[in-house]
Amino acid sequence: MNNLMTKSFLDYVELKKQATVIEGSGASPEASADLEAGGLTPAEEANLALFFSEVGAIQSAMDALSALLSDLRLLLHSESCSAHSPKLLSGLCDRVDSDVAAILRTAHSIKAQLEALDDSPRFAAGTSVDCTRVSVTHGIRAKLRNAILSDHKETLKQNYYNATSELASDKVIDEMLKWSGDPMDPPWSSPGAATPSAPASTSPPPRTSSRATSKTPPPTLSPPWLRATSPSPVPLPDSPSPPGSRSPSPATY
C-alpha cells in the first residue's frame, strides 16, 4: 500500500509534467505554467521534489519497520516453538524485547515525520503540492476501502460456510454486509450493534429520611426454591379399608 501511494504520486506528477511540455511547447516556463492545464512553476516543482524526498525517507523507515515486524512474527515464533533450553529461551526473550523497542522507536519517528510533513508551510492548503497530495490520497483511500470491503466479504463467506456448510450467494452476502455494517465504520454504528453507554454519573445519591425508612421495613425475599409453587398432590387410588375400621362419613357443609 505504501509503495502504491508513492508510485501514484510519481505517476501523477509525471503525467502533469508531460502535459506541461505538450501544452507549453515553444513558450517560456512562466507562460506554460497554467493551473488549468496542470502546469507547475519551478518553485512548485522544487517543493514537490522536496516533498517526494521526504516521503521517500518515510518510506525507507516504514520498510525497516516492516522488516522488524516480519522478524518478530515469523523467525522468533518458529525459533521459540523449537527451543527448549532455558538459555535459548532467555536469549529469545532479550531479542524480542530489543525488537519491540526498535519497532516503537521507528513508529514514533515515522509519526513525528508525518506530523512535520503535514505542518510544513511549503505544503500548505491551497498550494499545488497540497492539491496533488489530496487528489492522489482520495484515490488511494477509495482503493483501500474497496480492498477492505472485498476482504470483509470473503470473511463473511467463510463464516457462512462454516456455520451452514453451504456457499453463500451474492444476495446473502449483501444482507450480511448490511447487518454487519461497514468494516471501516466504528463498531457501534452497525444496525445490530449496541450503542456505547453514557458515562456513569458522579453525583452523590439523594438523601432519604431515616423516619420514612423506619416505617416501612424492607421486604423479606425468600429463596427461589421456596417461592416456587409446589405441585398439587396426585390422588392415590382407593384402597380397601381394613376389617373393623369405619369409613369416614362425608363432610357436611
Image (cartoon, helix red, strand yellow):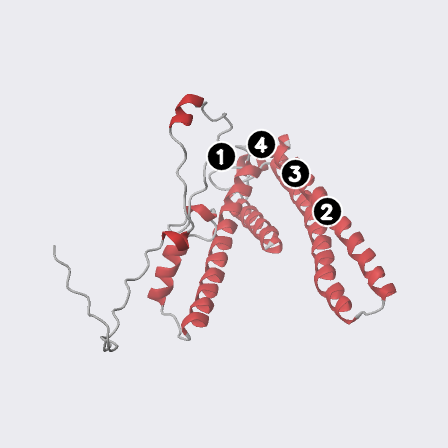
Q: Mark 1 or mark 3, which is nearer to you? A: 1
Q: Is residue 165 above or below residue 114?
A: below
Q: Residue 170 falls in which quadrant of the image?
A: bottom left
- Left or right, 218 with reference to 27: left
- Among all residues in the image, which is located at the extreme right? 87
Between the residue at mark 3 and the residue at mark 4, the CA separation in whole angstroms equals 15 Å
Q: Residue 92 falls in which quadrant of the image?
A: bottom right
Q: Which residue is mark 3?
A: 46
Of marks 4 and 1, which one's residue comes earlier in the chain?
4
Between the residue at mark 2 and the residue at mark 3, the CA separation in whole angstroms equals 33 Å
Q: Which residue is mark 1?
A: 199
- Give the mark count: 4
Q: At which x and y percent is residue 190?
A: 41, 50
Q: Secondary structure at mark 2?
A: helix
**Mark number displayed over residue 93:** none
Q: Which residue is mark 4?
A: 124
**Mark number displayed over residue 104:** 2
Q: Is residue 114 above or below residue 173?
A: above
Decide if residue 28 is in sight here.
no
- Left or right, 175 with reference to 249: right
Of marks 2 and 3, which one's residue comes earlier in the chain?
3
Between the residue at mark 2 and the residue at mark 1, the CA separation in whole angstroms equals 32 Å
Q: Secondary structure at mark 1?
A: loop
